[in-house]
Amino acid sequence: MKRIILLVLCLGIILVGAFTIEVETAPPASTRMILENTHQTYISPPCYEQAQKTNNLSEADLKKAQDLNYQPESGCTKDSLEPIKQPIAYAIAEKMGLKKSKWEW
């Protein structure tokens, strides 16, 4: 009986910790970006309408944009890619595909 109580208590502590301890998560390298090739900048999709852009656009991921040394087009793009703090359980759920990521646009 003591083992069951101890086991339930340990599982409870782990569960509470998973939802209260926060970790910082950053956008994955595969996050979709719009490249503005004339000005060598990248735009996150939520910021597309307000961006200063030409018609020389292409699509890539964040890793390629950074590999090309493109810069964020605006503060909106930079802010949309800032790491966020979230509970460990949410970060694990995102990695497992159970929860939609902030950067899935």
Image (cartoon, rainbow, N blue to C red):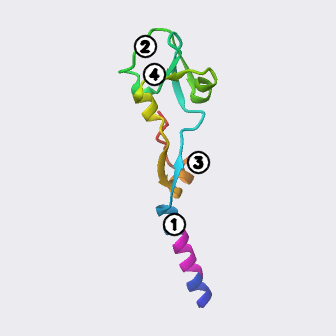
Q: Earlier in the sequence, mark 4 or mark 1?
A: 1
Contact check, label 1 and label 3, Cβ < 8 Å: no
Is residue 52 depicted above or below 100 in this figure? Answer: above
Task: Nearest to the eye among marks 2 and 3: give it.
Answer: 2
Q: Where are the magenta residues, as a range?
A: 7-14
- Cα gap from disc 4 to disc 3, whole angstroms: 28 Å
Cα distance in 3D space between marks 2 and 3: 33 Å
Label 2 with label 4: CB-CB less than 8 Å: yes
In the picture of the structure, the residue carrying the numbered disc 3 is 95
User: If the image is split into quadrants, where does the N terminus sit?
Assistant: bottom right
Mark 2 or 4, nearer chain start? 2
Which dot marks residue 39? Answer: none
For label 2, the SS is: loop
Residue 53 disc label = 2
* Residue type, label 3: Lys
For the residues bearing labels 4 and 3, Cβ distance under 8 angstroms? no
Q: Quadrant of residue 47?
A: top left
Q: Which residue is mark 4?
A: 73
Residue located at (53% from left, 28% from top): 32
Q: How many other residues sit within 10 Å of disc 3, few (<14), some (14-19) or many (≥20)?
A: few
Disc marking residue 17: 1
